[in-house]
Image (spheres, grey):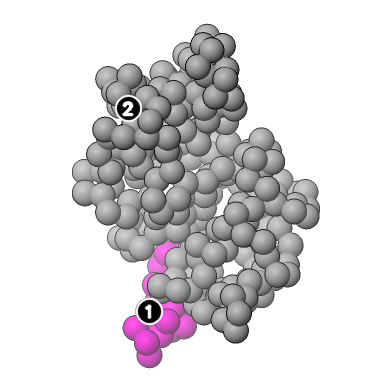
Amino acid sequence: MSAILLEVDHLTKRFGGVTAVNECSFEVQEGSITALIGPNGSGKTTAFNMITGYLKADSGHIRFRGDLIERPRPADLYRRGLSRTFQQARIFPELSVEENLVIAAGYSWRQLFGRRVSRADQDRARQILAEFRLESLLELPAADLSYGQRKLLEFAAVLMSNPKLVLLDEPTAGVNPVMIDTMERHIRERNAAGVTFLIVEHDMQLVMRLCDPVIVLDQGSKIAFGTPLEVQSDPLVLEAYLGG
């Protein structure tokens, strides 16, 4: 049986009188492609933000690779092997495509512009860009990329740290079917190479063919967990999505 890579234990977040995430608990097994789904406003991105240190939880605990993460910080988690993408791709538009990957490897701006980047990291950046078929654009300013290419670039950048777990927040939102197929292929290839994924995604066709297991949230709480087939026939899930 695979090891538990990420444990979320009774995570809670309130905004004024609204409870966005309510005593939420789930696990992500090493080697899996796990989906975190639910209706709009169910707390998925809020949970992501607490797990990755962009939002402080009101209560609950997070464990990564068996260690209790008492105060999650994005940079610390990145070094530990947990990285993420965002709904709107976060890149450096004024930097070239290649420089975006070099920065993701942990170099400072001074090192980058002083050309103090190791040959190994340059080679790795170009190798990843080749895998994502972005090598022909490596000198292009990231601002000139299409929306879908920016999503691919952000995904490529998080891989520079050799992560154990990648959290993808709506990786295919707003992209065309060809780009969806491309993103799915990269997820499968990286998973086969040993990377675990936790994915928030609204494209249910993609979730059902790509992810196993599937976690379902509603009103900030976990209401279902299982295989795609089990989840899509669960009465609580149908009620959450269809409103009863």
Residue at point 69%, 41% (across, down): 76
Whether 241 is among the magenta residues is yes
Label 2, on which residue? 141
**Position in image of residue 104 (x %, y %):** 52, 30
Residue at point 45%, 54% (across, down): 169
**Position in image of residue 42 (x %, y %):** 48, 74
**Relative to residue 41, is residue 116 drawn left or right?**
right
Q: Main secondary structure of the magenta part?
A: helix
Looking at the image, is mark 1 or mark 2 nearer the viewer? 2
Q: Is residue 52 above or below residue 154?
A: below
Label 1, on which residue? 241
Mark 2: amino acid = Pro
Q: Residues within 10 Å of mark 1 (few under 14, many from 20)?
A: few
Numbered disc 1: secondary structure:
helix
Q: Which residues are magenta?
A: 226-244
Is residue 96 visible in the rendered image? The answer is yes
| Marks 1 & 2, CB-CB < 8 Å contact | no
Q: Tally the marks.
A: 2
Could you give the CA–CA distance between mark 1 and mark 2, rounded to whole angstroms? 41 Å
Whether 129 is among the magenta residues is no
Q: Is residue 164 above or below residue 23?
A: above
**Relative to residue 54, is residue 226 drawn left or right?**
left
Residue at point 38%, 90% (across, down): 244
25 or 92: nearer the viewer: 92
**Position in image of residue 222 (x %, y %):** 56, 74
**Residue 43 - label:** none
**Relative to residue 70, is residue 48 drawn left or right?**
left
